[in-house]
Image: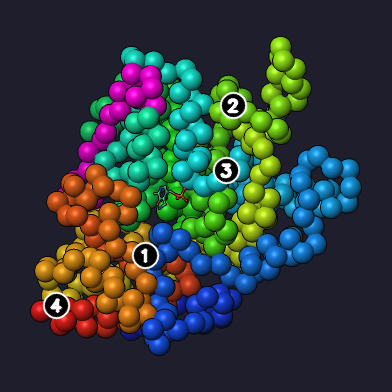
């Protein structure tokens, strides 16, 4: 990998102007400039998102879909406007395919609970060894409830899916494939199109966990052809507590609701209930209106930069960070997939990841340490946890240099 001077790493973006949009990045931590490198856990919000949420609370808040008064109309328009922004962002064919949820976790639980109503002991669920707990535990619970079998496709030492083995596990008993588009612990980008193509030959639906993909590159659900796509607002500059389940119209129409309550019905009597149309059949109760509006504002912000430019810039930054990390004695990268995003998981001989995280914090560098809710990945690599630096488009080469300097301090301290 060639050495790149930090000055050249901009991907054509005005990084300083972008950073100025994020109030939180302007602070000092322990007297140091903040280098926020924990974006895979949660990203930060630009001023426009914070402003959209507070504007909504200051001017427009009311419950949606129910009121005849002006505030309720405004709240409904803003909420449904956000749904349309999400539709466009992932190129879904209709807004009715966009279900607002609490996040990726809830989106996956929705599918597991709903699809699970028609699953039995002869059925199989196929996932991979690199899944986040959110894409393991809902399926395990489903298997415990129904007697179905959870099958797990293996990974190799580079942290890549062993595709041919996963494809060989597909069979007429497989009821769904649930796979990370991008791994949060390793950064691996999975060959999801090949998995979808093979699954569809057997009429098996595919759910992609897009929590780590949607913030970093353009997603086109029609091109992917997946039945379900799940992602979280807070990892893509939006609020916490809001996320999305994309479901293809015909598939969502066949699925039963998973939660009952207001909004998801057209009529209720003690004898009979008629469910609402999509997507409301899956949105019981008062939704996170401000969250959806904030997510819409986050999408506007990302679009104003351009997802392709974000992806290109983050790739440059990923390579620069990889090159600088390789200069550190005793540092081992966990996850060296050929295709990966700006997530560098690593361990350093003789230093516990939590100690590393603490020393780095004192140098203003925020990284994540631990198992990253992917314990099976940690077991596979025989580590209790890793340190993980994860990038966003508002990171700069200076953030990487600050990380490397802080790692230098830590390695000297523990030498
Ligand atoms: N899947 C992946 C790959 C993730 O990285 C995360 C968050 N770390 C989740 C699922 C769960 O997302 P949330 O906590 O926003 O529901």
Quarter of the rendering containing residue 45:
bottom right
Q: Is residue 163 left or right of residue 100?
A: left
Task: Say which of 333 and 138 sits in front.
Answer: 138
The local secondary structure at tag 2 comes to: loop
The local secondary structure at tag 1 comes to: strand
Quarter of the rendering containing residue 403:
bottom left
Task: State whether residue 29 is above or below residue 226.
Answer: below
* Nearer-N-terminus badge (1/4): 1
Which residue is outermost to the top? 271
* Nearer-N-terminus badge (4/3): 3
| Residue 116 visible somewhere in the drawing | yes
Residue 14: % across, % down: 53, 79
Mark 2 crowdedness (10 Å alpha carbons): few <14, some 14-19, many ≥20: many
Name which residue lies at 60% across and 61% down: 298
Residue linked to disc 3: 101
Task: State whether residue 94 is above or below residue 8.
Answer: above
Spatial CA distance of label 4 from label 3 is 44 Å
> What label sits on residue 390 in the rendered view?
1
* Closer to viewer: mark 1 or mark 4: 4
Spatial CA distance of label 1 from label 4 is 24 Å
The local secondary structure at tag 3 comes to: strand
Residue linked to disc 2: 257
Q: Name the image quarter holding the C terminus.
A: bottom left
* Nearer-N-terminus badge (2/4): 2
Q: Is residue 60 left or right of residue 148?
A: right
Q: Which residues are magenta?
A: 142-161
Residue linked to disc 4: 414
Task: Say which of 223 and 89 sits in front.
Answer: 89
């Amino acid at each position: 990998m060639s050495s790149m001077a930090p000055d050249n790493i901009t991907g054509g973006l005005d990084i300083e102007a972008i950073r100025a949009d994020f109030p939180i990045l302007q602070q000092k931590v322990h007297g140091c400039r903040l280098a926020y490198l924990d974006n895979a856990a949660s990203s930060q919000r630009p001023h426009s998102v914070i402003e959209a949420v507070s504007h909504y609370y200051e001017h427009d808040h009311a419950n949606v879909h129910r009121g005849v008064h002006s505030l309720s109309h405004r709240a409904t328009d803003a909420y449904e406007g956000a749904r349309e922004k999400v539709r466009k962002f992932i190129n879904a064919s209709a807004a009715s395919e966009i279900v607002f949820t609490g996040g990726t976790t809830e989106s996956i639980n929705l599918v597991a609970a709903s699809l699970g109503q028609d699953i039995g002991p002869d059925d199989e669920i196929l996932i991979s060894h690199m899944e986040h707990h959110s894409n393991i535990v809902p399926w395990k619970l489903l298997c415990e409830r129904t007697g179905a079998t959870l099958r797990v496709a293996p990974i190799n030492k580079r942290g890549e899916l062993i595709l041919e083995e996963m494809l060989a596990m597909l069979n007429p008993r497989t009821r769904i494939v649930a796979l990370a588009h991008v791994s949060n612990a390793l950064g691996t980008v999975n060959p999801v199109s090949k998995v979808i193509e093979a699954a569809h030959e057997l009429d098996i639906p595919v759910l992609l966990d897009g929590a780590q993909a949607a913030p970093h590159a353009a997603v086109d659900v029609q091109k992917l052809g997946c039945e379900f796509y799940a992602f979280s607002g807070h990892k893509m500059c939006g609020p916490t507590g809001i996320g999305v389940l994309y479901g293809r119209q015909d598939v969502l129409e066949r699925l039963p609701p998973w939660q009952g309550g207001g909004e998801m019905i057209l009529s209720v009597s003690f004898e009979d209930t008629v469910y609402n149309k999509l997507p409301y059949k899956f949105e019981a109760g008062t939704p996170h209106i401000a969250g959806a509006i904030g997510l819409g504002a986050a999408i506007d912000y990302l679009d104003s930069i351009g997802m392709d430019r974000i992806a290109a810039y983050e790739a440059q930054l990923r390579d620069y960070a990889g090159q600088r990390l390789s200069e550190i004695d005793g540092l081992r990268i966990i996850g060296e997939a050929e295709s990966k995003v700006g997530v560098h998981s690593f361990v350093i001989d003789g230093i516990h990841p939590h100690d590393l995280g603490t020393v780095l914090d004192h140098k203003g560098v925020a990284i994540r340490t631990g198992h990253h809710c992917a314990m099976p990945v940690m077991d596979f690599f025989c580590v209790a946890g890793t340190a993980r630096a994860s990038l966003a488009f508002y990171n700069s080469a200076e953030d990487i240099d600050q990380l490397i300097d802080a790692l230098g301090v830590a390695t000297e301290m523990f030498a």
